[in-house]
Image: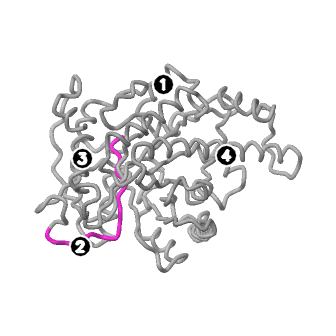
Amino acid sequence: MTAALWATLTASAAFGQPAGGQPRLPVGYVLDTASPSMNRTGGQKWTPPALGRRYFVHLFSSGRPQYESAVSFFPKPDPHQLERNTHWLRCVGALRGAKGAPGGGVAVYGVVDLLQWEQLTAPEPHPFRVSHPEYFEVDRYGTPGQEADEKYVSLHVPEVRSALLEMVREVGRRFPWLDGLAVRAEWCAQYLRGYSQAQRAAYLRHAALDPMDLTLSDKASEERTRLLDWCRWRQDELTEFVGEVVAAYRAEQPQDRVLAVARGDQYIVDPVRMGCAACDWLAWVRRGFVQGVLLTGRWDDPRLAGAWQVSKRLAAETGKDCVLSPVISPTCRYQRVGVKPQVEALRQQDPGLGDLIFWPEKATDWDDIEHHLGATIVQREKPRAAVPPLAGPNAQTQEAAK
């Protein structure tokens, strides 16, 4: 799923309280300022009032921290975008209130999307794809995907891995008011992109076998077994990395909850497809890395029939305290789907469906969400005149981001 439309959070009467005394709704929102969709909204501002119970705000997306980071490895976000990010981070912090104090049911999590460094139809390549193409995972033909595809980095590049861990530690220090962290760590789910020099070398050390020598066979054979061994190894490697990420965050915030953002179809697809994304979130639950999972997908797709039910059963079988939440985007990969058919598909599997998490990808998604909830959750402002990019983050922006 591509990233969400950016948003700032305010309330009209007492800041941090639902406007007009309206009760908070049993929903949450995923908000990401780095979305290419947001870049096409013409500078329009969106201010959802405090009607949700949970908010998930991206702090690392598209291969960049979405705040004023001291980690020098990463490219800086656009200064004008940084100014907007700072504004809504301040709003969300005020919405949450003091950590540990009664928050009226509001919880705020920071989201780190660790491996997807270019989103679907990104307006321009990530700077490192030009200067350091070796950082990115590629297919067996040596390409990171079609130009409009998502692009993913290799966790087997030491400088990439260490920079990501340093960023996560920084998030723990810089945003102590968060209720926790939501970790998204997966590779391309549609194709096997695991042929970077870094990953090939790592598997060669592990199994004395170059993945390029494997045959992509779907028939039972020795070749198939070797292919599945590699896919399993990819999942294990990603699990170990997630363990390092969680340890880095909990070194700063040991009491916070950590959640995963993962694919809802991970355990109903072919084992090779499972090895593509390699996001074995059940292993993360079993090992105590995460205490909840946000599951994404187009829930009315027949290919996901039963996926929610299977995921709940498998999570329960771990014996761990793990809460699953379905994530609904009215637009999936730029195709307008709407909310109602997805909610209906989920309720067919689970009549007692709990809180929903909405992940808007474009401006019109808010209309679909409001129609489903029967409430106005977004205050829309008229488009303002385009503001020229700043020469650099001003002192006020930098101070507010601290």
Q: Is residue 249 something that shows in the picture?
A: yes
Q: Residue at x 50, y 72 (%)?
A: 346
Does residue 390 appear to the left or right of 170 in the view shown?
Answer: left
Pick whichever of labels 4 and 1 is earlier in the sequence: 1
Does residue 304 appear to the left or right of 92 in the view shown?
Answer: right
Kindly check if marks 1 and 3 are in contact, taking CB atoms under 8 A apart as contact. no
Distance from disc 3 to disc 2, alpha carbons, whole Å, reads: 22 Å
The amino acid on which the numbered mark 1 sits, given as a three-letter code, is Phe
Label 1 sits on residue = 128
Residue 31, magenta (yes or no) = yes
Q: Residue 236: give its label.
A: 4
Q: Residue 23: give its label.
A: 2
Q: Nearer the viewer, mark 3 or mark 4?
A: 4
Q: Nearer the viewer, mark 1 or mark 2?
A: 2
Distance from disc 3 to disc 4, alpha carbons, whole Å, reads: 36 Å
Vertical comparison of 314 with 73: above or below: below
Find numbered disc 3 in the image and state the secondary structure of the residue it sits on.
helix
Pick whichever of labels 1 and 3 is earlier in the sequence: 3
Q: Which residue of the protein is positioned furthest toward the bottom in this rendering?
A: 351
Vertical comparison of 177 with 344: above or below: above
Label 3 sits on residue = 88
Kindly check if marks 2 and 4 are in contact, taking CB atoms under 8 A apart as contact. no
Q: Nearer the viewer, residue 85 or 257?
A: 257
The amino acid on which the numbered mark 4 sits, given as a three-letter code, is Asp
Callout 4 crowding tier (Cα within 10 Å): few <14, some 14–19, many ≥20: some
Distance from disc 1 to disc 3, alpha carbons, whole Å, reads: 27 Å
Pick whichever of labels 1 and 2 is earlier in the sequence: 2
